[in-house]
Image (cartoon, rainbow, N blue to C red):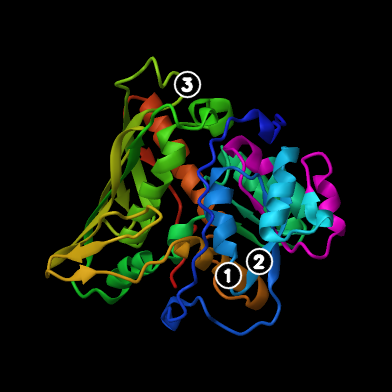
Amino acid sequence: MEKINRRTFNIKLTQGLAGAALLSNMPLSYGLNSGKQDKKLGIALVGLGGYAGGQIAPALLNAQHCYLAGIVTGTPSKEKEWMDKYNIPRENVYNYENFDSIAKNDAIDVVYVVLPNSMHAEFCIRAARAGKHVITEKPMATSVAECDAIINACKENGVKLGVGYRMQTDPYTQEIKRYGKEKPLGNVKYVRSDSGFIAGSWITPWRLQKKYAGGGALMDMGVYAIQCCIYGAGANPVSISAQEFKTKPDYFIDVDETITAQMKFSNDVIGNVFTSYNANGNNLFVSYERGWVELNPAHSYGPLSGRTSRGEEIKFPFQRQYQQTLQLDAYAQHVLTGSPNYAPGEMGKRDLIIVEAIYKSIAEGGKTIPLDLGDMGIVRV
């Protein structure tokens, strides 16, 4: 596995570090407030790029069950900035060379890997061997083999593993799952999700290099559309076919630009996925026997919005950093109390199996690829 220093990536920070309060009236049915704990887990962020600085760190300011305890960075100039901003003691600051010594630090309970995709496996495995619980940002890794290595390392070292799928704890996701379970509009028949944006000069350069990103739009945005279709259908796909399109081949030289995929699910639901680095998409549409439900936007930071064929609006209160705070508190509760893990490693691996099947289908001219996933990664809460 190639070791890459985080400093080599030209990450353009989009910080805006104002925190926001966690909604205190979140319904208990969402399972995010199960049990009371006095202990708050200390989380160390590995990689201090735009997402860590603009979303995760501010979210931790308002978490009930965890807090920002440490940082790992390859950029010395960031150390003092983060120490001052988040009151992080010097002994909780690490770089990529001395990272393994975090094993001796009892103030750090969880390591959250927020690095380029190609670095996820290395630092997740090192964190697990240091005896720390692990969260890895999505996608879990760049291959199924790397996912297996991460899962095995966590099992061997007796630590918990989660994937940074913030949408899994979002109330809009839970509402779509409720429609599937309670069936107010009947059984699901069809699902569709689009996820993409128009990439410009601002996009972080490593995302356009396969050796760092593992792929293009599919690895970055496509996993959102895959996730949406799966929780909308309430089942895993049993087969998939896909096509790739490039309208800017001179720009997207090394990675995919636009991909469409068609899926059949184990409950006979049909689904369509669209993802792109050259077209905007941010929605989920679920068709039932007696109507439909739509989220648009469906997977951005918020505010999200939805509606139904009955003319009803799906609307929850919104505050900035809301998704990540719920995500991190839910994971902390999983570690502390054994409550559900909304995004386990098996879910991240499942999605990479699907991604690899999509790439295989494209390479074979759109051939239908069978999948044998069972209920792998399905979390019904």
Is residue 186 in view? no
Q: Please tell me which residue is depicted at 49% across the width and 72% down the height of the picture.
A: 22
Residue furthest top in the image: 250
As shown in the figure, which amino acid type bears the numbered disc 1? Answer: Ala
Residue 239 sits above or below residue 164 on the image: above
Mark-to-mark CA distance, 1 and 2: 7 Å
Q: Which residue is at the front of the view, 239 or 53? A: 53
Question: Looking at the picture, which amino acid does disc 3 mark?
Answer: Asp
Picture coordinates of residue 276 (x, y %)?
Answer: 34, 35
- Secondary-structure class at tag 2: strand
Query: Do labels 1 and 2 touch, CB within 8 Å?
Result: yes
Residue bounds of the magenta highlight: 94-121
- Residue drawn at x 32%, y 22% is 246
The label number, if any, that marks residue 130 in the structure image: none
Foreground: 375 or 317? 317
Q: In which quarter of the image is residue 328?
A: bottom right
Which residue type carries mark 2? Answer: Tyr
Residue underneath mark 3: 254
User: Residue, x 28% and y 51% (percent of image)?
Assistant: 283
* Residue position for label 1: 63
What residue does disc 2 label? 67
Residue depth check, mark 3 versus mark 2: number of the one nearer the observer = 2
